[in-house]
């Protein structure tokens, strides 16, 4: 039996979107895995997005469909991506998850695989707390958490500055947002997508 994996992300300037593409590519490497990409709805007013330059940056992934509750109910596994906001997920992602009460009441997500990747501005800007605090919501839904094991060599790469945690792939955007995901960070994200799909395949075969 084939499995469905949905990658659901929020990205303001495109960093998390680039990571999401790498995660999606990893999922697609697993035989029988069907991968789909979704973004959560934007709740920031257009005027603020335009003033900050985010509106123009978001045009690069405007074609990605907006996630609904069905985007969570349908797949066997969901991989979430979010930038950090003071050590937690972005408000846009929180807003999306806060609409899942109906799914929780029915136990819809119990037994599905859940995984998280993230971005921060700096090396110590909340990469791990963003992911581990995100896990609390997934555990309340009864999801099975999957991270990134140390069999992914990128986690121990000390040759350059890089994101990447055993909780999930991460990237560093820079304080001004100018830094793009590095090859090592994209490699870890790719691994995460493939690893989640492999785990889901074993659970749902």
Image (cartoon, rainbow, N blue to C red):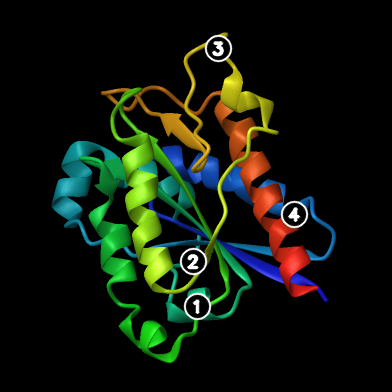
Q: Residues within 10 Å of mark 4 (few under 14, many from 20)?
A: some
Q: Is residue 164 left or right of residue 124?
A: right
Give whichever of discs 1 and 2 has the lower sequence position: 2
SS state under label 4: helix
Q: How many marks?
A: 4
Q: Which residue is mark 1?
A: 109
Q: Is residue 24 visible?
A: yes
Q: Residues within 10 Å of mark 3 (few under 14, many from 20)?
A: few
Q: Tell me what residue is drawn at x 32 percent, y 42 percent.
A: 129
| Closest to the observer, 178 or 29 | 29
Q: Which residue is mark 2?
A: 65
Q: Quadrant of the C terminus?
A: bottom right
Contact between labelled residues 2 and 1, with CB atoms less than 8 Å apart = no
- Asked where in the image residue 197 lies, by quadrant, the reply is bottom right
Q: Is residue 25 left or right of residue 180?
A: right
Q: CA distance from mark 4 to mark 3?
A: 29 Å
User: Does 49 sit above or below residue 186?
Assistant: below
Q: Which residue is mark 4?
A: 28
Q: Which residue is mark 3?
A: 158
Contact between labelled residues 2 and 4, with CB atoms less than 8 Å apart = no
Question: Given the current orientation, which residue lies at the most extreme bottom position?
Answer: 106
Give whichever of discs 2 and 3 has the lower sequence position: 2
Q: Tell me what residue is drawn at x 59 percent, y 17 percent.
A: 157
SS state under label 3: loop
Q: Quadrant of the N terminus?
A: bottom right
User: Does 84 sit above or below residue 9?
Assistant: above
Q: CA distance from mark 1 to mark 2?
A: 21 Å
């Amino acid at each position: 039996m084939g499995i469905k994996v949905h990658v659901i992300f929020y990205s303001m300037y495109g960093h998390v979107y680039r990571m999401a593409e790498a995660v999606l590519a990893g999922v697609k490497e697993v035989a029988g895995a069907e991968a789909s990409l979704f973004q959560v709805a934007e709740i920031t007013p257009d005027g603020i997005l335009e003033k900050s330059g985010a509106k123009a940056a978001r045009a690069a992934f405007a074609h990605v469909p907006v996630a609904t509750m069905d985007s969570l109910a349908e797949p066997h596994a969901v991989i979430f991506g979010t930038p950090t906001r003071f050590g937690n997920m972005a408000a846009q992602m929180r807003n999306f998850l806060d609409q899942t009460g109906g799914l929780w009441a029915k136990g819809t997500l119990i037994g599905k695989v859940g995984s998280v990747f993230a971005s921060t501005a700096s090396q110590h800007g909340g990469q791990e707390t963003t992911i581990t605090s995100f896990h609390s919501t997934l555990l309340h839904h009864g999801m099975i958490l999957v991270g990134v094991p140390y069999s992914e060599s990128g986690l121990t790469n000390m040759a350059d500055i890089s994101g990447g945690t055993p909780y999930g792939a991460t990237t560093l955007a820079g304080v001004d947002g100018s830094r793009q995901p590095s090859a090592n960070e994209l490699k870890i994200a790719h691994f995460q997508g493939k690893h989640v799909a492999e785990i889901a395949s074993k659970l749902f075969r």
